[in-house]
Image (cartoon, rainbow, N blue to C red):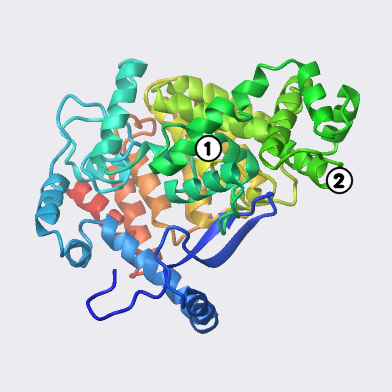
Amino acid sequence: MAQAGELHVATISHALAADAMGAGEVERTYLEPMGDQSVYASAMLDAFEKLVLTGEYEERLRRHYRLVKDALLERQHPIHRVIRDLASASEPEAARQADEEIRQPIRRGVTVARNDPCPCGSGKKFKRCCLETGLASSPPSTGLAPSPPALEKRQQRQNYWQKSGLDEWFLGRACTPALAQVEVEAYLSGSPHAPFPLHPHVAARLAEDAHAPFDERVLKLVREHLKTGWTFSRVAGMSLDSIGDQLRAFGVPYSRELFVSQASGSWSAFGLAGNWIENEPVICRRRAQLFFGIAAHELWRRLLPERPSMEMLDDQMQDGYRLIREGRDQAAADTWWKLWRVATPRIPGAIRATEDVTEVFSGLQLFSNWIGTFQDLLLELQYEGQPVAGWGIEFGLERIRRFPDDSENCQVSSRRAVASHMLALGHLREGRKMLETILTAWPRSAWGYVALADELAHFWPFSRALPRDLDGARRALELGLKKISPDDPDREVLLERLEALSG
């Protein structure tokens, strides 16, 4: 917002996004479609790219962003209060109420899963917030009691999202509602694509969400599309012959044998449809061309179910997120386990990091985000006493082998998860060895020392497989303090654990 006497010139965004046709993850600076722009906006964007986004300044932007984000999320950070006051200076009453909510402990009688957003409103996961600081009035599930019914679990999660200021929209989606709205409008009206165009399959799915947080103008387009347009449900109700007849009427040569041959050399149904539009004598308006991608998707689903397309895998991923929203975690794990077994062999061996999977997979959710959610889901089910530890070990070891260039945080968290599943099955030697491997490979990561100390000290009620060794836990934490940088904010976790052991 410009102050009095100032001119708002441009709203500029700088972000990472997946390329529309799965060509990889690209980093771009662009004029925000939903922001205010002046006639000087293009010149300002050019100046910003040339004068600001040099290597030195770009790294400084990244570093400051990380520092401010850590300070905002960590209530004990020295400048946490300063940032909150600056952000809410114009609404002191809202800031005061937010402070009151932040201090509220979790009420007795509510079971909070470790990986759920913390109900205190900090924005962190429960396991990284009130569960660690002792504000939780009741302990997490030990796995001795059965899981709450799906309906109750669903209601609990909706309450957590609401209290944490989160939007259920983001569960399973890598795009913001603002970007999705621009994309849906482009998809349905034929206007130019947004700066970071989503994959056409994603845009097609979003264009059928009548409950999306879009403005009324775009929702009107969605409702009209659901009534009269080519939708997934409409095409799914057609016979194979009817789909083929419609394609031929639009100028696309079709036979079942020809389609199977074309699909055998492709990965994406919508990509195959794009080839039809580009190479065949298509005779229909642009709006009618929306039929092609959905038709290719439906044909692939029926004729080649044993070799799913990228879009079919994306649908399966979204099925899992839907089941989580409904509180049906075990069913979500079953769905995602099948997805993992099918999708992983399809990823080229040259891709060695989960973030790079965007080169071949452009879905509604990033593969790297999904794989972390699946890991957390298996851990949560294991803590609840569900028999998923075998899956967790196989999944984790395959992830470690398949993606050796993942970030340090991913490498450490995946090994912690594998160790937890090993210990749950009674494989004590293997589990401890996995934890000690973290200390050897990443000696400057605080979380390896925390993980080993937690197991030795029986810090969590659901993880008490190793013999209790408080002295060993202290030695691990003290070693961590010697190894990691004095400026590393994760030192605070080590100090908190040592204080808890002393108490």
**Would residue 142 be seen by someone viewing this image from the given angle?**
no
- Element at badge 2? helix
Residue drawn at point x = 41 percent, y = 32 percent: 211
Residue drawn at point x = 52 percent, y = 66 percent: 30
Q: Which quadrant would residue 396 be assigned to in this image?
A: top right
Observer-nearest of 246 and 103: 246
Q: How many labels does the image show?
A: 2
- Element at badge 1? helix
Observer-nearest of 263 and 254: 254
Please provide percent x and percent y for residue 310.
68, 36
**Would residue 215 be seen by someone viewing this image from the given angle?**
yes
User: Dot 1: within a 10 Å radius of its alpha carbon, few (fewer than 14), some, or many (20 or more) residues?
Assistant: some
Observer-nearest of 472 and 311: 311
Q: Is residue 280 above or below residue 256?
A: below
User: Dot 2: within a 10 Å radius of its alpha carbon, few (fewer than 14), some, or many (20 or more) residues?
Assistant: few
Sooner in the amino-acid sequence: mark 1 or mark 2: 1
Residue underneath mark 1: 206
Residue underneath mark 2: 279
Q: Is residue 63 above or below residue 150?
A: below
Residue drawn at point x = 26 percent, y = 42 percent: 164
Residue flagged by tag 2: what amino acid is it?
Answer: Asn
